[in-house]
Image (cartoon, helix red, strand yellow):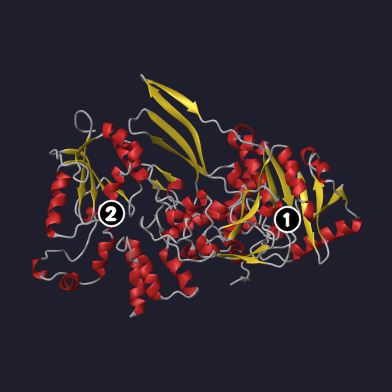
Amino acid sequence: MAGKGIPKLAVWKFASCDGCQLSLLNCEEELLALSSAVHMAYFPEASRAMIKGPYDISLVEGSITTPHDAERIHQIRRSSAALISIGACATAGGIQALRNFADVREFTSLVYASPQFIETLGKSTPISDHVSVDFELRGCPISKNQLLEVLTAFLHRRKPAIPSYSVCIECKRKGVVCGLVAHGPPCLGPVTQAGCGALCPTYARGCYGCFGPKETPNTGSLTATWKESGMDDAELLRLFRSFTATAEPFRKESESHEIQNN
Amino acid sequence: MTYRLEANALDRLFKALGTKGYVIFGPTVRDSAVVYDRIESPNDLPAGWADQQTNGSYRLVKTDSPAYFDFTAPPQSWKRLLFPPSLHLFRSHRRNGTLEILEEEHETEPMAFLGVRPCDLRALAILDSVYLNGGASDSTYRQRREKTLIIAVNCTRAGGTCFCASMGTGPEAGAGFDLCLTELVSEHDHYFLVESGSAKGESCVSPLQAREATPQEQTSGREAIRTAAAAMGRSLQTQGLPELLAANLSHPRWDQIARRCLACANCTMVCPTCFCSTVEDSTDLSGAIASRTRLWDSCFTAEFSYIHGGSLRPTIKSRYRQWMTHKLSSWVAQFGSFGCVGCGRCITWCPVGIDLTEEARILRGQAAEHV
């Protein structure tokens, strides 16, 4: 990497639940290898020692939701040779981007006793809306194996092996019987990017779309089929309005059911 | 010679296979479906279960029949046992500037596939033509295939998405089995007709202590298979099909299919003959160890046709057309047969129920039957 000695790693947090950066600590068996491959220079969740930048790699968790954060992300970008955004919040705006479909002032007036002190943005947006990002790692939360793969790839200057195809491919490789076809819970697997190891379908649950849209997602065909089998627009809207609600193809899909609702 | 084995003596077959050291794979109920998995006795078989299949839907229903083999095509084929979805190929270590390659050892126990449907039997022959093909032979596939005993079971019931009769691949087993069973159930009788198709199969017959089947019993077997042939849920007119598809690459129908197709790749994953794979390389954090893994791949992904500068098939239309014309047209030129055996899995397991028999019919200019 750019610096001398072992590369300096920083982990930054924006609006998020901490689950994605926790994946780094969750590496357990690989943690020793990781700490000898990178210098954890700035990682407040793990250590109070905070070493100044510049950093070789910055992992950025969370979405931009305040004017202050919209400034801060530029400073981080300037001090990072490579910036990798991690998780649904950082790559798509996260669950908190549900505010994008409403008026955030209504929420603050209901939630806070003195909403006049709340300084927040009208929309929750991904990091790539504000600065250039070198890689976006999807997931809610991210997969620790994918995180290790991306870090390893950046350390060795190769392309990360992160597929953009559907969850169905992971499901079928595992030999999971397709619940969507065999017992019918709505499953977003056919339009969602792989990476989770088909976690929910393995336990007979439909995919919630945590990893966001796959490449060429045909959401309209899936919802047309479900509509024929009796689902209504309100249900279809909710399916696409969760952890990656404002990822473009999912946003458009849910909005198409909103329009028909009115 | 054809033998008659009483249904309640089926455990003799399991014992005979066990004695010969085979690990038995066969149909069993799991996750609301009949799947192929490891089984140990007739108790593991899906007796009294039948599947109902149509485009985009599979349901398992309880029946009153004592039949062990009332199911039709399971969610996945035998492909995954011979051509594993994920396979480590090798690892390499870098030590003091030199690279050491460590090939992965893939020891396989002898496997007995019990309950190979005629369509899937034909699919194995097609996979053989791909993977045991002279210079391009795949060592893992070969090793596993050579250790596999095939026990086919003729179909006496056809599924809602079956069209093997059109493809000439069933419902009676063609060549390639070691043993072949036909299950016959009537009010007072439940037995199997047993034929052997190889010396390996023949050696499994004597432990069964089965008597020779009467001509009448053999006739009953043929009639039961004919019943299945007459009850196919789907059909595909194959005459002139390769030329028809090749001449219609700009047909407007491809755009209509593309509006429905999810490019999720389920059809290719469940197809018993789809053989595409990719290799994924990874390194450890230190960069001292690298490994290569082979994974099932699909022509429905953008990455599949990615070369420098982009994907050759960026649209869903181009991917579906590639798949269907390969199965039913260019496969013939490539391997001398269709790449489709009429198992109907791509129809059943398509989340939006696209039916290639219907699409072929529309491309041919005929009205659809099932919409």
Q: Residue furthest right?
A: B215
Are both tags, 1 and 2, on one chain? Answer: no
**Mark 1 Cα within 10 Å, few/some/many (few <14, many 20+)?**
many
Quadrant housing the C terminus of chain A: bottom left
* Side of B365 relative to A29 (left or right): right
Task: Decide which of A233, A224 is in the foreground and name it.
Answer: A233
Q: Residue at label 1?
A: B170
Q: Residue at x 62, y 62 (%)?
A: B357
Q: Where residue B350 sits in the image (x, y, percent)?
A: 53, 61
Q: Quadrant where the N terminus of chain A lies?
A: top left
Residue A156 visible here: no
Q: Nearer the viewer, mark 1 or mark 2?
A: 2
- Does residue A97 appear to the left or right of B148 in the view shown? left
Q: Position of residue A88 (x, y in %)?
A: 30, 55
| Cα separation between marks 1 and 2 | 50 Å
Name the outermost residue toward the left: A117
Question: Which numbered dot is residue B304?
Answer: none
> Label 2 belongs to which residue?
A91
- Name the amino acid, label 1: Gly
Horizontally, is A257 left or right of A8 in the view? right
The picture quadrant where one finds residue B360 is: bottom right
Residue A19 x, y percent position in the rendering = 28, 52
* Nearer to me, B112 or B86: B112
Splitting the image into 4 quarters, where does residue B18 fall? Answer: top right
Q: Residue at x 81, y 67 (%)?
A: B187
Position of B361 compared to A179: left or right? right
- Tell me if I can see residue B200 in this picture: yes
| Label 2: how many Cα within 10 Å (few below 14, some 14–19, many 20+) | many
Of B246 and B47, the residue lying toward us: B47
